[in-house]
Amino acid sequence: MTDHPRYALCGLSNRAIGTFVGALLDSVVPGRPDVERAPGELVAILDADRDRVDQFLAQQENPAIAAYGADEFDRMITEARPDRVIIATPDHSHADYVVAALGHGLDVITEKPMTATAADAARVLAAERDSAGTVTVTHNVRYTPRLQQVKRLIMDGAIGRVLGATLDYHVDTRHGASYFLRWNRTRAASGGLSVHKSCHHLDLVDWLVDDLPVTVYARGGRAFYGPDSPHRPRDEHGAPLTGDWLRAADPYQRAQQGSGTFPDDDHGRTGLAGLSYPVQYPDGQPFTLYDDEIDIEDHYTAVIGYRGGATLAYTIDFSSPWEGYRLGITGSHGRIELDYGHDRDGSPRPGTDQVIVDPLFGERRRLEAAAAQGGHDGADAIMRRDLFVGPTEESRRLGLAATTEQAAYAVAAGEAIWRSARSGSVINIADLLGHDVP
Ligand SMILES: NC(=O)c1ccc[n+]([C@@H]2O[C@H](COP(=O)([O-])OP(=O)(O)OC[C@H]3O[C@@H](n4cnc5c(N)ncnc54)[C@H](O)[C@@H]3O)[C@@H](O)[C@H]2O)c1
């Protein structure tokens, strides 16, 4: 790899703009002054929405960046000659771009989830085996300072052999609702939230437990959003409200007035750098939380079994009064507990500032939780340094970068959750990935 790699980006998404693009430009991306410059340059952007890319290029002082449509991947590689490809499109499209980049022998950085389905994850694993290129999946949660601290404690033997974890995760009414107002709300686009969102949590626990999951049993469903939501505003005859009437009466929208989560009217919405989404969210076709198109779950409870015998008891809901999690790790010699979150007014939840280490036969320690500035509680800046400059010795020791196989298991466990919730059966992850757990 050269000292100054050429990067091509697939998907000029909010995530790409907020996390990667600014690091590869000499100019600052509007609204993202905190992203530090990395070695390398952005030479091409591919997106299904050419208008969106043009809006972005018009903001740049020296836009020596070539633009390509969604079906021009090979042309982009031939003309722009990138050394690495960053993929930050909606989840369902990751696999095709990753496999295409690997076909050119290129290294790929792709957003999580690596793919939207386990079958696509298996396809990526096979393509990587046959390629000179490699895949790096941006499982940024691992980089969160307080979670690195937990990993360090486990590695240093603070609780002995890990027997299992509990993770009780809540996504609040603003953040949770936002998924149902975006492309994420269909299985076809995102794999469902047990893949799209839970892949973060499943990967986190796999990493902490240092093992891969083998079986999943889950329950779950849709209780908050979609056409049958108990919160859906109706008129006196029971007919669903629409348009301005719906906007005025929608309890989620009323609670979030001015937050930017809900488009103010039927006109197209904008994201970071003020870019609109004329293709993805066209004018005059507003998404509501109660649309028939919504076909994914909004809460789950799962029991996950690991190869070595450890377990994860996991719950998540996407319409909670608060945002955050309660994480517990039980070991043969003690327990680690970490509560993290904030209330609707942004105030931290009790316990958010500490990591508790509770040995079976010793003094309880309350450690100040490690923290850092920046996106995703400081995780993104640390991950960006490792991605663009190279991992530090400590990053390697902690195993901060997810392997392609770990990323595939996070997708497969997420798919197993919704499949189990739907069928009532225990799902074997190897059956979804189509190969035996190594
Ligand atoms: N790691 C994290 O913390 C994190 C956070 C947010 C999003 N993400 C991931 O980032 C990715 C982007 O999510 P987002 O919500 O920022 O997206 P977005 O909705 O802001 O943007 C999607 C972009 O992709 C383009 N697009 C859509 N389909 C395409 C296709 N088939 N080919 C090329 N371009 C296409 C759209 O025009 C748009 O520019 C997703 O994979 C998501 O899961 C990760």
Image (cartoon, rainbow, N blue to C red):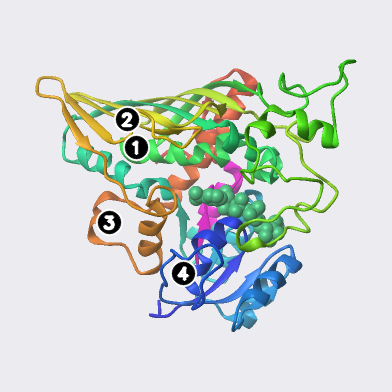
Q: Earlier in the sequence, mark 2 or mark 4?
A: 4
> Helix, strand, or loop for circle 2?
loop
CA gap, disc 4 and disc 1: 33 Å
> Helix, strand, or loop for circle 3?
helix
CA gap, disc 1 and disc 3: 17 Å
In this view, the residue in front, 111 or 38, is 38
Residue 349 within the segment the image draws in magenta:
no
Residue type at mark 1 is Asp
The magenta stretch is 107-126
Residue 190 point in image, percent of width and height:
64, 43
- Does the residue tagged 3 have its C-beta within 8 Å of any atom of ligand 1? no
CA gap, disc 4 and disc 3: 22 Å
Residue 106 tag number: none
Residue 211 tag number: 1
Residue ID at (24%, 53%): 397
Residue at the disc numbered 3: 396
In this view, the residue in front, 257 or 401, is 257
Residue at the disc numbered 2: 308
Residue at the disc numbered 4: 23
Mark 4 or mark 3, which is nearer to you? 4
Labels 1 and 2 touching (C-beta < 8 A): yes
Residue 12 point in image, percent of width and height:
63, 63
Q: Earlier in the sequence, mark 4 or mark 1?
A: 4
Labels 2 and 4 touching (C-beta < 8 A): no
Residue 111 within the segment the image draws in magenta:
yes
Which corner quadrant of the figure contains ligand 1? bottom right
- Does the residue tagged 4 have its C-beta within 8 Å of any atom of ligand 1? no
Disc 3 packing (10 Å; few <14; some 14–19; many ≥20)? few
Labels 4 and 1 touching (C-beta < 8 A): no
Mark 4 or mark 1, which is nearer to you? 4
Q: Earlier in the sequence, mark 4 or mark 3?
A: 4
Q: Earlier in the sequence, mark 2 or mark 3?
A: 2
